[in-house]
Image (cartoon, coloured by chain):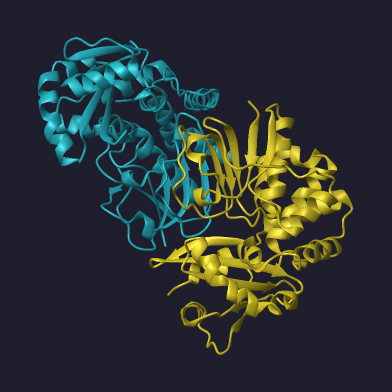
Chain colours: A yellow, B cyan
Amino acid sequence: MTTLVFGHKSPDTDSTGSAIVWAWYLDHMGTKAEARLLGTPNTEALFVADRWGFTLPEIMADVADGQDCVIVDTNNPAELPANINNANVTAIIDHHKLVGGLETKGPIDITIRPVACTATLMFQLMGGHGGHAPEGIKGLMLSCILSDTLEFRSPTTTPADKQIAEKLAADLGINIPDYAAEMFAAKSDVSRFSDAELLRMDSKEYNVGGTELRVSVLETTSPKIVLDRKASLMGSMPAVAKEDGADQVLLFVVDILREEATLLIPNDTVKQIAEKSFGVAVSGDTVVLPGVMSRKKQIMPVLKM
Amino acid sequence: MTTLVFGHKSPDTDSTGSAIVWAWYLDHMGTKAEARLLGTPNTEALFVADRWGFTLPEIMADVADGQDCVIVDTNNPAELPANINNANVTAIIDHHKLVGGLETKGPIDITIRPVACTATLMFQLMGGHGGHAPEGIKGLMLSCILSDTLEFRSPTTTPADKQIAEKLAADLGINIPDYAAEMFAAKSDVSRFSDAELLRMDSKEYNVGGTELRVSVLETTSPKIVLDRKASLMGSMPAVAKEDGADQVLLFVVDILREEATLLIPNDTVKQIAEKSFGVAVSGDTVVLPGVMSRKKQIMPVLKM
């Protein structure tokens, strides 16, 4: 049976790239494997796949009972196919907090490390094999790391992320600032997406004291493109929340270059969450949060009602 | 803050020994750490600790909010302190299936591998450090592996378990068959325990189609000592089940030397479970299951009602 390798729903660069990377590695080590996607990747991931010569993996709606699979870049059943607990998960490689809910039939390989990026951990797990990977695979690993660390600006960045990215860039003859700027420009090109698509593009569900929050992040080098649409985005929030079973949508527009986030304030509940969580005074329909770039490290841990 | 390292409730040799081993390793690498126990260890673990010159770690009733801790040999919240999800878990090292339910506050180090023993995985994670560990630590690692693999007889045994145990034994000048026989004799010395204590000594809760089973295993080189008490053990099952919120108690007496298990049949429900799960015809109050030695590999996966 071919092992299917996939990341989370609403695939970003790391979930798309590291699934392709690990499928290559399994194949390289003698296990037939193919990457899959759980949805259409974001514009940065599309740019990256194209840049390094990969056609996009097939999009998969669910997994069959007993299907061999490897989960990368998540351990959250809410971000995985509905039937995941009936599949045969053979390994999990991730860098997120353990959320619980995922079960395996027997003991399997699970490696979770507090690095910024799944591809960093994969490079480590490959031992020497990462160093003689084909150019395209190295390019994907580099792209995943630059994406998840926002070119080493995010506080999630560890020395391992930076060191491995720099080694890969050197092998490939890539200038990191130039290449990262290209990637971020691709990510910022969101004009063709509807408001609802933008709100769901990079979004995680999070329960705070019984309230279900959809915590959405848009990382961009052109925040103006998104903020010019703020009235329309806020107008779409109630419908998106209702459809997704959430109570509120929090949209953080992360300015990669200025290293700050702007949170949209559609109502008094979100205003209260912003003030309590970030210790700021909110007036108007947005609030700037200097230095905030990481949902994992700077948003999720402080959110309160 | 001192990091506390502990395994599961009803500690066996691996949960006791590998907690001491990892606390030593953390200390050795510059993180202040101490092992703890979540109950009185079994007789084999007591023998092993004494044999290698360790005083038993302190028994702990619960963990405080925010306490730094490392969990070894389990990832099951039911086998951990009640307050575990409010502690600061910094790492999990385990070789069991992912059961779900444990949550961490942020991304942490989690390593789960399908080897027979936590100490095997620890030896691998230590890189070169395992090789220059003090004699007592090497002795614990060897003991954990011999215990969990039943001296390499259990089908959970992997080449890594065997190879590392043999390396440790050679370093220590230990004859494996002689030493394992001493360990198993210690484990078989159960005469001083009450029926209820024996039923809970090495026991895991398992839900099969809505029925809560307490699946207990006694590994022994002297099955007669236990089986001579079968009437009394079966008489104690209803009270133990009731107290623990279980519907049935399954007691498997594993004969380490003959490589078989004897399941006690206290009633028609357990008789039916035995016949459906193991494809045997049951008459009388026990049934012998040839080759069955591992709860994880040969009992849990086949149990049905």
Viewer-nearest residue: B261 or B146: B261
Q: Residue at x 57, y 40 (%)?
A: A62
Residue A190 appears at what percent x and percent y? 74, 66
Q: Is residue A203 left or right of residue B72?
A: right
Viewer-nearest residue: A270 or B133: A270
Q: Is A287 located above or below residue B211 in the figure? A: below
The quadrant in which the C terminus of chain B is found is top left
Instruction: Judge whether residue B299 can be spotted in this image.
Output: yes
Residue B89 appears at what percent x and percent y? 44, 55
Residue B33 appears at what percent x and percent y? 42, 53
Q: Is residue B35 left or right of residue B121?
A: left
Viewer-nearest residue: B87 or A17: A17
Q: Is residue A134 left or right of residue A227?
A: right
Q: Is B171 located above or below residue B285 in the figure? A: below
Dividing the picture into quarters, in which one does residue A282 lie? Answer: bottom right
How many numbered callouts? 0
Q: Is B96 located above or below residue B172 in the figure? A: below
Viewer-nearest residue: B304 or A30: B304
Residue B229 appears at what percent x and percent y? 13, 19
The quadrant in which the N terminus of chain B is found is bottom left
Q: Is B35 located above or below residue B154 in the figure? A: below
